Amino acid sequence: MYVEKDEIYKHSNLKEKKTTVNKHLNSIYKQIENNMGFVPNSVYAMGKVPALLSNFTMLSGLLIGNPKKVNLVSSIGLVIKNIYYSLKFLREQNRVPLYLKSLVGHISSYAAGCKYCQAHTIINAKHYGASEAQLNNLWQFETNPAFNDKERTALRFAFAAGNTPNAVTKNHFAELNKHFTETQIIELGAVISLYGFLNRWNDSFATVLENAPLQAAEKHLSPKGWEIGKH
């Protein structure tokens, strides 16, 4: 059993409880330890959402894992666990709404400057039910009446997290805790982190923007100053 972590993050109040989480994830932690020589604190919070930890472990193992330390049996076990955890998480009812995750992804991409992801997230937000007023005024979320306090809190977090250097403070988490559960806060952080990957990928490779998100961006974002840029 891995040791209990009383504090793993300075900004949030996320705490890993070995009696409720670690005993189910020890095999994954062990794989990480075998590869790195220790278990990073970052993965303990991911363990609050087992599907997040298992999916991240598979991706990071694929890209930066040591192939000499790959254990076939353990790897197959991770795949099976990942399927189980993912299906379970996808069916949970108390998740962050898809439209809000799209808005969060947009604002973090806006802070990072990725025009491609801005276009994709605006069309996704529309698809998942964001209002026309929200789509047209997303960059003015702080003052526009189309957004409520809960949405503004998530979008402030996204903007601070999308900046370089990162601008998230304890105050962001204090506000998040008023509106979201611990699991939802981790989910928001994961969405922002996913778009951090996509921002760098699409800006580095200058991915050509498809027609549908281009039209959505021109409709909802161009009046506020959006341009296609390198895409």
Image: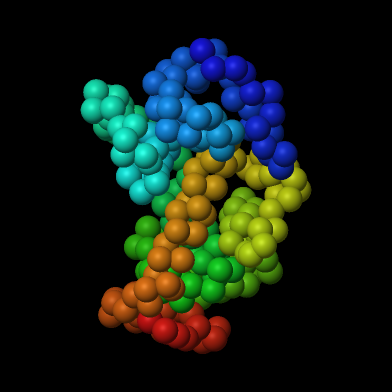
**Residue 24 location (% of width, % of height):** 42, 18
Q: Specify whether 79 is left or right of 139.
A: left
Is 128 or 5 nearer to us in this picture?
5
**Residue 231 location (% of width, % of height):** 38, 81
Q: Specify whether 224 is left or right of 98.
A: right
Which residue is at 67% across, 62% downward? 165
Q: Quadrant of residue 14?
A: top right
Which residue is at 57% across, 42% downward? 185
Is 73 or 110 nearer to us in this picture?
73
**Residue 74 location (% of width, % of height):** 29, 24
Asked if residue 28 is positioned above or below residue 3 in the image, the reply reads below
**Residue 151 location (% of width, % of height):** 59, 55
Furthest-right residue in this view: 171
Whether residue 48 is visible to the viewer of this picture, yes or no, is no
Furthest-front residue in this view: 68
Q: What is the number of callouts on the image?
A: 0
Q: Name the colour scheme.
A: rainbow
Is 207 or 212 nearer to us in this picture?
207
Which residue is at 62% across, 18% downward? 4
Asked if residue 189 is positioned above or below residue 138 in the image, the reply reads above
Is 37 or 93 nearer to us in this picture?
37
Asked if residue 200 is positioned above or below residue 76 in the image, the reply reads below
Whether residue 161 is visible to the viewer of this picture, yes or no, is yes
Which residue is at 51% across, 75% downward? 136
Asked if residue 154 is positioned above or below residue 48 in the image, the reply reads below
